[in-house]
Structures are given as structure tokens and as C-alpha cells.
Image (cartoon, grey):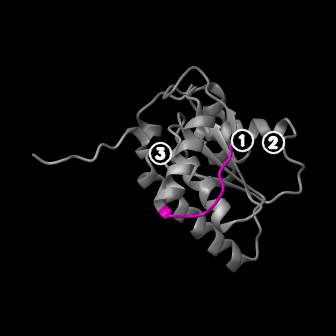
Amino acid sequence: GRTPYAIPVGGSVPLGSLGYVNCAKEIANQAGELDVDFDIIVSATGSGGTYAGLTLGAKLFLPGTVSVGIGVCDDPFESISLDLMRETAALLEADVPVDPADVHIHYHIGPGYAIPSPEGCAAVRRLARAEGVLADPVYTGKALAGFFQLLEQGAFDGDEDILFVHTGGAGALFAVDMV
């Protein structure tokens, strides 16, 4: 007789996206304390909620910062993220315009969702060797590989301050075979 609250994969509903709106607020606060102005924030996009929350949060708390999502599956994140951003803004009662020009998605899927890719595994190893930071090979690792790909392709001019948001998943390192 009760009404359950259905939470889809990744928590990608407006309420779930609020967590990453708050993450953007925290980024803004810490950047202010460190006197850093981020030009670009890059994050993995596997169901849309993280990216939508960060992008809306950037519009609210980091004016001028572009949010780039690295799609790790073939879902239509341009529309998914836009809808989530609009619904989350409505939930916040925030009078902030959200339009398709706010959405920047680069796809780096590999062989499929939740399947490690050689590029993602190489990116995991590269980050671990260079910085001692662990990432999973099927989500953050693929996003990191997509970010490295954008860097190598010259998608950024080299003068930007870029933040890559590591959303976790290191436990998956022990659940899959690294290719």
C-alpha cells in the first residue's frame, strides 16, 4: 500500500542529479579558496545524472565553465542530459536557462557498456603510474581515455584549467579482466 520511489541505474533522476549540482558548488568553493578558475570540467557519462548535475551546477556556480561529458555507452546523452538539467533546475526553482548549446558530449564507448576497452585499461594504467590514482576500467577509465583522446586531438588550446572529475569505481578493478 505504499508508493515506492523508483531509482533508475545511476540514480539519473532530478533528485539524484542534485548531488552533482552540490558537487559543482563545492568545486566552486574550493577553486575560490585556491584562486583557480576552471575553464572546463570533464566527467564520465554513463546514465546522464552526474553530467547533468555538474553541467547545471557549473551554470549556477561556475559561470563561464564548460562541462564536457565523456559518454561511455551509446545512449543519446544530448537529450537525456538536457531533460535532466531542465527537470533539476525546476526542482531547485532555479531561473536558469538550459539549452542544447550547454551540452558537450564526446563518446568513447569501446566494445560496449560495462566492457573494458584497451584504451580505457591503458588510461587506468597511465593514471596509476603517473599519479598513484586508481580508476575502474569500464566507467571512469573509459572517460579518462576519452579525455586523453580529446587532449591528443587538440580539442583544448592548452591554456585552460581543466578539472577531470573522478567519480569512483576503483572496486571494479578487481571484478573485471584488464585487457
Residue 80, by quadrant, is: top right
Specify few, some or many for label 2: CA neighbours under 10 Å numbering under 14, 14-19, or 20 or more: few
> What secondary structure is the magenta-colored segment mainly?
loop
Magenta stretch: includes residue 93: yes
Q: Is residue 90 above or below residue 47?
A: below
Kind of residue indicated by mark 3? Gly
Specify few, some or many for label 3: CA neighbours under 10 Å numbering under 14, 14-19, or 20 or more: some
Q: Is residue 137 above or below residue 109?
A: below
Query: Relative to residue 43, is residue 158 drawn left or right?
Result: right
Mark 2 and 1 residues: CB-CB less than 8 Å, in contact?
yes
Say which residue label 2 marks: 151
The residue positioned 42% from the left and 37% from the top of the image is 174
Query: In x, y percent, where is residue 21?
Result: 54, 60
Query: Relative to residue 72, is residue 68 drawn left or right?
Result: right
Kind of residue indicated by mark 2? Leu
- Choose between 4 and 68: the one closer to the eye: 4
Q: Is residue 151 visible?
A: yes
Residue 35, by quadrant, is: bottom right
Residue 169: which numbered mark, if any?
3
Which quarter of the figure is the C terminus placed in?
A: top right
Q: Earlier in the sequence, mark 2 or mark 3?
A: 2
Mark 1 and 3 residues: CB-CB less than 8 Å, in contact?
no
Q: Is residue 167 visible?
A: no
